[in-house]
Image: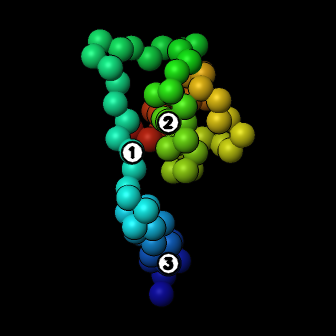
Amino acid sequence: HHPEYQQLKEVLARYWNIEQKGGWTPLKLLENQKITLGTSDAFVEDLKTRLIFEGYLKEGTNNSVFDSSVEQALKEFCQ
């Protein structure tokens, strides 16, 4: 098999595992809530946890502050 196929199978297994455990908790902003650099709240903490799991953000950045590293990781995730 091709290496890419093996990687795809591993990622799929990760997502099946998430599904088996109840799936992701939806990330919800409050109405009119804006996230800007320096914002610190539970939404940002949940966002960072998701970005770390997805591999867009390094481990050890699990505080609740939206900083430039989170902004960059979110941009990469959205591409």
What is the x, y in percent for residue 20?
40, 67
Q: Name the residue under label 2.
A: 46
Whichever of labels 3 and 2 marks the residue nearer the N terminus, that label is 3
In the image, 2 versus 24, the foreground residue is: 24
Whichever of labels 1 and 3 marks the residue nearer the N terminus, that label is 3
For the residue labelled by badge 1, is the local secondary structure a helix, a strand or a loop?
Answer: loop
How far apart in space, not on screen, are marks 1 and 3 (Cα)? 28 Å
As drawn, which residue projects farthest toward the right? 60
For the residue labelled by badge 3, is the local secondary structure a helix, a strand or a loop?
Answer: helix
Residue sitting at 60 percent across and 22 percent down?
65
Give the amino acid type for the residue marked by disc 1 in the picture. Answer: Thr
What is the x, y in percent for residue 50?
50, 44
Residue sitting at 34 percent across and 30 percent down?
28
Do labels 1 and 2 touch, CB within 8 Å? yes
- Checking the image for residue 25, the label placed there is 1
What is the x, y in percent for residue 29?
35, 24
How far apart in space, not on screen, are marks 1 and 2 (Cα)? 9 Å
Residue 38: image quadrant is: top right
Few, some or many C-alpha atoms within 10 Å of disc 3 (few <14, some 14-19, many ≥20)? few
How far apart in space, not on screen, are marks 3 and 2 (Cα)? 29 Å
Is residue 11 visible to the viewer in this orientation of the structure? Answer: no
Q: In this view, does 46 lie above or below 52?
A: above
- Checking the image for residue 6, the label placed there is 3
